[in-house]
Every structure is written in structure tokens, then in C-alpha cells.
Amino acid sequence: MSASAQRNLQSSSTKLAQLQQSAVDLKKNPNVSSDPVAAADSLAIRAQQAAAAQYGRNIDDGVNWLATADTALAGATTLLQKAKDLTLQGSNGSVPPEARKAIAAQIDSIRADLLSKANTQYLGRSIFAGNSSQGVAYSQDPLTYTGEDGSTVQRRTSPTSTTRVDGDGAAIFGTNEGDSVFGLLSKISNALRSGGDVNALLGDVDTAVNKVISGRAEVGTRHAQLLLAQTSNTNNVTDLENQRSSIEDLDIAKAILDVKTQELAYQAALGITAKVIQPTLMDFLR
């Protein structure tokens, strides 16, 4: 009877200790052996949480890439519109040679600023040259595009989706002096200095402006897609955390109630055991 009572008391004491530990850790199952199925579910959800966190970092990085590209293209649009206005001024036959040279100097300045916009970087990488490692999208002397055909920067936003986050420099600005917007500005500048007619180049300037605007619209579309992916990923992170919490986290109110209930049961077991076990010879001798 004594041995049996001792085993029962030890079992009750062990259960009380487990409940107290759970209350301290605020975990339903402090040990994997307590509930292997719940432990497996918890590991699976934590793996999904890790993936969602990485998707979130990818999306944030992509948003920054596209925001940088949008800012650069906005500046490029302004510069080209100014170049168009100057070209219109220079096309007026009544403008004196000195004024045309002054306009040509402004065109040269715009070309340099536009080249700087095309060579915009984000975290040390060119945003208009795909995966090029050259550091700039356009090198000079002679002007050369450093990107490769089909080379793009992608960011994975979900298990099944990726989004391009760089700008297509070749399509927006051109690839060399002959077919690029930089070559066009050089032609306008040279024509103004030499007394040539720049009227014929106005249509090319309009085309260059439209290319930049189209490139910016494409960047804006992808930026909007990433923002939607960001919202979806944030919701997914919240759902996964709720699932993890439902499996792992302990309800503090229930934990306190369980501990108190088990304490009462243990105290009752102690009292009953003390009354049930018969006195020994030593009890009589005392």
C-alpha cells in the first residue's frame, strides 16, 4: 500500500511539475515527446514562416529597386522634355549662331545628366543593365551598353511567382552611340553648332521621350504588382503566426487554472494517503 501510494503521489507531483513548467514557458508542449504530432505540425509551420520572411525581404528589396528606377526615369523624362524645348528653339531660323551654340551647350549638359540617370545604381548595382557586373549601364569612349540580352534581375515573391525589378536600359535608352538617345542628343548639339537643321530630329526626340515614358509605365506596373504581393505576404505571415500560436502557445488563464487544480489534487492526495496508510510500529513506540 505504501509503495502504491508513493507511485501515485510521484505521478501527481510529476504532472504538477509539468504544468508549472508549461506555465513558465507559456508552451503547450515543452518537450517534443509530449505531443509528436503537434511538434511535427509546428516544425512545418515554422518552415513556412521562414519562407514567408524571405519572400518579404525579396519584395522589400524589389520595391526599392523599382522605386529607384522610377525616380531615375522621372528625371530622364524631365530632361528629355527640356531637350525637346531647346531643340524647338534651335530650329527657329532667326536664332543667331551664338545663341545656337549656347543651346548646344545646354543639350550637352542634358546628355551628361541623362547618362548619369541611365547609370543610376542601387546598392552598388546598375538598375538598367540587368545582371551586368560592370557597375555602370553605359560606359563611354565609345558609348557602350554593358547589359546582356535576356539578362534581368528577378525577385521571388511567392513559391510560384517572380517579378523583374530592373529597368530595360537597352529598350529605354538604346545600346550604342548610333541608336541611343545619347547619340541623338549629340546629333542635335552638333547640328546646332554647325548651323544645320534640327527640325528633322524633333520626331526622334518625341520617340525618345515616349520610350522613357513607356519604360516608366512598365516599372510602375511591376511596382504595383510587388505592392500587392507585399500585402498578400503580410497577410500570410499573420495567418501562419496564428496557426503557430494555436499549436504552441499556452493560454495563460487556462494554465493558471490547471496548475491550481493540480495543486489541489496533489494536496488532497497527500492528505488522503496520510490517513489511509496504517500506522507502523514506530508510530506506536513514539
Image: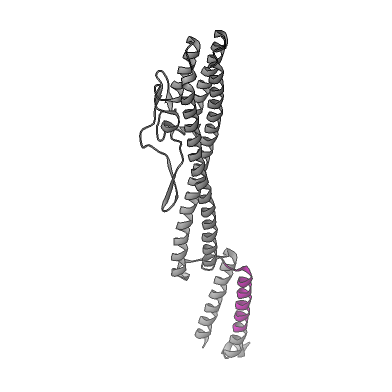
Q: Is residue 122 above or below residue 13?
A: above
**Residue extent of the magenta highlight:** 250-269
Name the spot of residue 261 as percent of width and height, x first.
62, 78
Examine the structure image and report whether residue 253 is included in the region drawn in magenta: yes
Of the pair 52 and 167, the residue shown nearer to us: 167
> In this image, 285 relative to 240: left or right?
right
Question: Tag count in the figure?
Answer: 0
In the image, residue 83 sits, relative to residue 156, either above or below, namely above
Scheme of colours in the image: one colour
Foreground of the two, 248 or 206: 206
Please tell me whether the stretch drawn in magenta is mainly helix, strand or loop.
helix
Query: Which quadrant would residue 250 be assigned to in this image?
Result: bottom right
Indicate the position of residue 122 as horizontal and vertical percent values. 50, 34
- Is residue 100 visible to the viewer in this orientation of the structure? yes
Image-quadrant location for residue 17: bottom right
Where residue 166 appears, x then y in whole percent?
45, 37
Q: Is residue 18 above or below residue 182?
A: below
Tell me the quarter of the image containing the C terminus: bottom right
Is residue 124 in view from this perspective? no
- Give the image quarter of residue 146: top left
Q: Nearer the viewer, residue 43 or 190?
A: 190
Of residues 282 and 147, the one drawn nearer to the viewer in this rendering = 147
Q: Which residue is rendered at x = 47% and y = 29% of the image?
A: 207
Q: Is residue 259 left or right of residue 178?
A: right
Residue at 56% over, 18% down: 89
Q: Residue furthest left?
A: 149
Percent across and percent down for residue 132 are: 40, 32
